[in-house]
Image: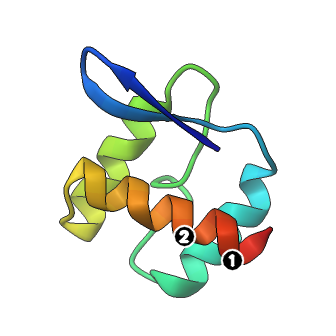
């Protein structure tokens, strides 16, 4: 997963096995649903918004969580 800057603010690009990462996220954050973690290429910002809302976190906090999960799972 890579972090990118866009006009909407920081975003992500998934470059690895999202299924494995999403399983790890569900273990650490049981509030997250399959729908929250549903990934479609090109719609990363929508997924980030769902996670932000569910966890009541900022986009930057969610990106930090995702980065940590990638490190743990890899």
Q: Which residue is mark 2?
A: 68
Frontmost residue, 47 versus 69: 69
At label 2, counting other C-alpha atoms closer than 10 Å, the crowd grade (few under 14, some 14-19, many 20 or more) is: few
Frontmost residue, 67 versus 24: 67
Colouring scheme applied when the structure was drawn: rainbow
How far separated are the C-alphas under marks 1 and 2?
6 Å
- Identified at 39% across, 78% down, the residue is 31
Frontmost residue, 32 versus 62: 62
Q: Which residue is mark 1?
A: 72
- For residue 66, above or below residue 10: below
At label 1, counting other C-alpha atoms closer than 10 Å, the crowd grade (few under 14, some 14-19, many 20 or more) is: few
Farthest residue to the top: give it: 7
Where residue 70 sits, quadrant-wise, is: bottom right
- Identified at 66% across, 38% down, the residue is 14
- Identified at 69% across, 77% down, the residue is 72
* Picture disc at residue 3: none
Frontmost residue, 62 versus 31: 62
Which image quarter is the C terminus in?
A: bottom right
Q: Is the residue under label 2 in contact with that under label 1 (CB below 8 Å)?
A: yes
- Identified at 27% across, 69% down, the residue is 55
Where residue 41 sits, quadrant-wise, is: top right
Indicate the secondary structure of the residue bearing disc 1. Answer: helix
Measuring from the top left, give residue 22's x and y in whole percent. Answer: 64, 63
Which image quarter is the N terminus in?
A: top right
Measuring from the top left, give residue 45's x and y in whole percent. Answer: 39, 31
Looking at the rendered structure, the number of numbered marks drawn on it comes to 2
User: Is residue 20 found left or right of 40 in the rendered image?
Assistant: right
Measuring from the top left, give residue 28's x and y in whole percent. Answer: 52, 85
Indicate the secondary structure of the residue bearing disc 2. Answer: helix
Measuring from the top left, give residue 42's x and y in whole percent. Answer: 56, 19
């Amino acid at each position: 997963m890579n972090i990118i800057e866009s006009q909407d603010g920081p975003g992500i690009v998934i470059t690895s096995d999202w299924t494995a990462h999403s399983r790890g996220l569900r273990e650490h954050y049981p509030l997250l649903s399959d729908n929250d973690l549903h990934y479609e290429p090109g719609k990363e910002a929508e997924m980030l918004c769902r996670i932000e809302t569910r966890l009541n976190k900022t986009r930057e906090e969610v990106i930090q969580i995702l980065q940590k999960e990638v490190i743990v799972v890899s």
